[in-house]
Amino acid sequence: MRVFIDQFSRLLLAIVMSLNCCVALAETKSLCVFDLLGANGPIYAQMKDYKIAAMGWGVDLHLKPYISEVQAAADFKAGLCDAVSFTGIQSRQFNPFTGSLDAMGALPTYAHLKTVISTISSPQAASLMINDPYEVAGIIPIGAAYLFVNNRSLVSKNEDTQGKLSGIRIAVMDNDPAQIELVSLLGTPLMSVTIAEMYKKFNAGLVDVCYGPAVVYQAMELHKGLGSDGGVIRFPVAQLSLQIIIRQAEFPAEFGLKSRNYALSQFDKAVQLAQSYEHRIAPQWWLNISEINQQRYHDIYRKTRLSLRDKGVYDARMLRIMHLVRCKKNSQLSECIAADKE
C-alpha cells in the first residue's frame, strides 16, 4: 500500500511540475472578448475553456471582457489586445472571407454550417485564414439568428406581399452594410442601432422587429418586447459565428492551425448549447411561415448577397462555397441552375 502511495505521490508531483513548467514557458497575450453580458456571459465562459486549451499551445491568454464589439475591434486595431473574439459580422473588416460566413440566408441549417467550417478549417485552406497581419484562429457557432416581432399579425398581413413593407420598423446594426441593404430592398424605414440598443428599443416598443440568436431571448429579456401578441419566426436569417482573430506575428508558429482544430472540435458542443437556448423559448412563441413565404425570403436574401458581393462587402469565394454546399445538400433548389450563381 505504501509503495502505491509513494508512486501516486511521485506521479502527482510530476503532473504539477509539468503544469508549472507550461505556465512558466507560455507567452502571455491578451484576448479581448465580446459578450453582451460581459464576464458573466456564455461566450466569455467559452473563452475560459479556450484559454485552458491555448496553454497547451504555448500561450497564456489574459481575457478582457467587452460588452461592445465595436470597442473590442477598435482596441484590437490599436494594439491594446493581441487577439480578439467577436461575431463574424464584426470580423469581416479583418478577414472578408470568413466574415462573409454570416451572410444573410446563406446557410439554412447547422449541418450546412458544419460542412463549411470543417472545410475552411482544414490545413489546405490555411492561406484563406490569413489577411496580413491578421489570422483567423477559430470559428465557433453562436446560433441561428431569428426574427423577433412584437405583433404576429405582421407576418400574416405580409404573407403574400411581394413589394414593400413600409409600415414595419426593423432595427438594423449600424455597422453592418448587409442589414442596411436588406432593409433597403424591403422598403422599410432604416432604424440604425448598435447591437445593445437594438434589444432595448425592441423592448421599449420603438421598433417592431429585431433579430438575434435564441440566447438573447433570455439574456436581453425579449419577452418584454414580444408582449402578448409577438413571436419568433422559425426561419433562420443567418448562422451567427464567434470568430477568434490574432495578430499572427505575435503568436507561436502553428498556433492558428492548432486553435482552428480546437474550435472545430467544439462545434457540436456549441450547437447543442445554441439549441438548448432555442428550446427555452416556449412553443407558443414560435411562428411558422408558409413555404411560399420561405421562398420569398430566400429570394430576398439571395438578391441581398449578390448585391453585397458586387459592392465588395461579401467575399465572392465564401459565397461560392456556401452556394455549393446548399446545392450539394439539395440539388433541386432553383438557384442551382440560375444564370447568376453566387
Image (spheres, helix red, strand yellow):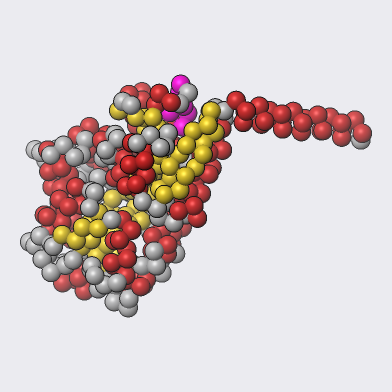
Q: Is residue 183 left or right of residue 146?
A: left
Number of marks drawn? 0
Residue 37 image position (x, y, % from top left): 44, 56
Q: Is residue 147 visible?
A: no
For the point 51% across and 36% down, the residue is: 61
Which quarter of the figure is the C terminus placed in? top left
Q: Is residue 12 magenta?
A: no
Q: Is residue 260 above or below residue 162?
A: above
Instruction: Tell me: residue 311, above or below residue 232.
Output: above
Identified at 36% across, 56% down, the residue is: 213
At which x and y percent is residue 239?
Answer: 32, 48
311 or 107, which lies in front?
311
Towards the viewer: 31 or 324: 31
The reply, left or right, for residue 315 in relation to residue 225 is left
x 33%, y 58%: residue: 196
Residue closest to the far right:
2
Left or right of 43 in this view: 321: left
- Where residue 173 appears, as percent x and y from the top left, is 25, 54
Image coords of residue 121 (percent x, y): 38, 31
Occupied quadrant, residue 214:
bottom left
**Main SS category, magenta section:** helix
Is 254 magenta? The answer is yes
For the record, the magenta segment spans 253-259
Name the residue at the bottom extreme.
228
Q: Nearer the viewer, residue 89 or 126?
A: 89
Q: Quadrant of the N terminus?
A: top right
Which residue is pictured at 34% across the width and 42% down the height?
Answer: 73
